[in-house]
C-alpha cells in the first residue's frame, strides 16, 4: 500500500511538471516512504529503488519541482541531490524557520 501511494503521488508530481497547462503543485511531501515496507532484503531493495527514483526526479527536473521526504533513516542512495536536515528533541524546527514563540501557538485539541 505504501509503495502504491508513493508511486501515485510521484506520478501526479511528474504529470504536473511536464505539460505547462496543468495546474497542480510542483512540490511533494512524502512522510516515511519506507515505514510500512518491512525490513527483509526485498523490502530494503524496494526502498533503495524508491530513493533512486527520487534521485532521478531531482536530477531530471531540478528546480522545477521540490520533493521533501521525511524519513527516520538517511537515504539509502547516496547522492548529491539529497540534502539532509536532522531534527531532534533539542532542535525540532527546520533551520531558518523562526518559532512563533509560546504566546502565538495553540494546541489543536484546545480549539472548540
Image (spheres, rainbow, N blue to C red):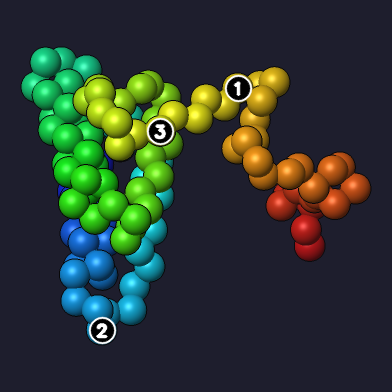
Q: Position of residue 51 (x, y in %)?
A: 22, 34
Numbered label attached to residue 21:
2
At x 30% / y 37%, what residue is drawn?
Answer: 81
Q: Position of residue 32 (x, y in %)?
A: 37, 35
Dot 2 alpha-carbon crowd within 10 angstroms: few under 14, some 14 to 19, many 20 or more: few
Residue 71 visible within the image = yes
Numbered label attached to residue 88:
1
The residue nearer to you, when weighing 112 against 70, is 70
Which residue is tagged 3? 83
Dot 1 alpha-carbon crowd within 10 angstroms: few under 14, some 14 to 19, many 20 or more: few
The secondary structure type at the circle numbered 2 is loop
Distance of label 2 from label 3 (alpha carbons): 30 Å
Which residue appears farthest toward the bottom when viewing the image?
A: 21
Question: Does 86 appear above or below 17?
Answer: above
- Which mark is first along the chain, 3 or 1? 3
Whether pointer 2 and pointer 3 mark residues with C-beta atoms closer than 8 Å, the reply is no
Question: Does 64 appear above or below 76?
Answer: below
Which residue appears farthest toward the top when viewing the image?
A: 40
Q: Is residue 54 left or right of residue 40?
A: right
Q: Is residue 17 left or right of residue 67?
A: left
The secondary structure type at the circle numbered 3 is loop
At x 66% / y 25%, what residue is drawn?
Answer: 91
The residue nearer to you, when weighing 71 against 39, is 71
Amino acid at each position: 500500500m505504501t509503495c502504491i501511494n508513493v508511486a501515485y503521488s510521484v506520478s501526479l508530481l511528474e504529470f504536473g511538471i511536464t505539460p505547462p497547462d496543468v495546474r497542480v503543485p510542483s512540490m511533494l511531501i512524502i512522510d516515511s516512504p519506507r515505514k510500512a515496507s518491512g525490513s527483509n532484503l526485498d523490502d530494503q531493495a524496494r526502498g533503495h529503488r524508491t530513493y533512486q527514483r527520487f534521485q532521478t526526479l531531482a536530477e531530471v527536473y531540478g528546480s522545477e519541482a521540490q520533493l521533501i521526504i521525511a524519513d527516520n533513516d538517511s537515504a539509502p542512495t547516496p547522492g548529491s541531490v539529497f540534502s539532509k536536515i536532522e531534527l531532534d528533541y533539542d532542535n525540532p524546527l527546520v533551520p531558518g524557520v523562526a518559532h512563533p514563540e509560546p504566546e502565538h501557538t495553540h494546541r489543536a485539541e484546545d480549539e472548540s
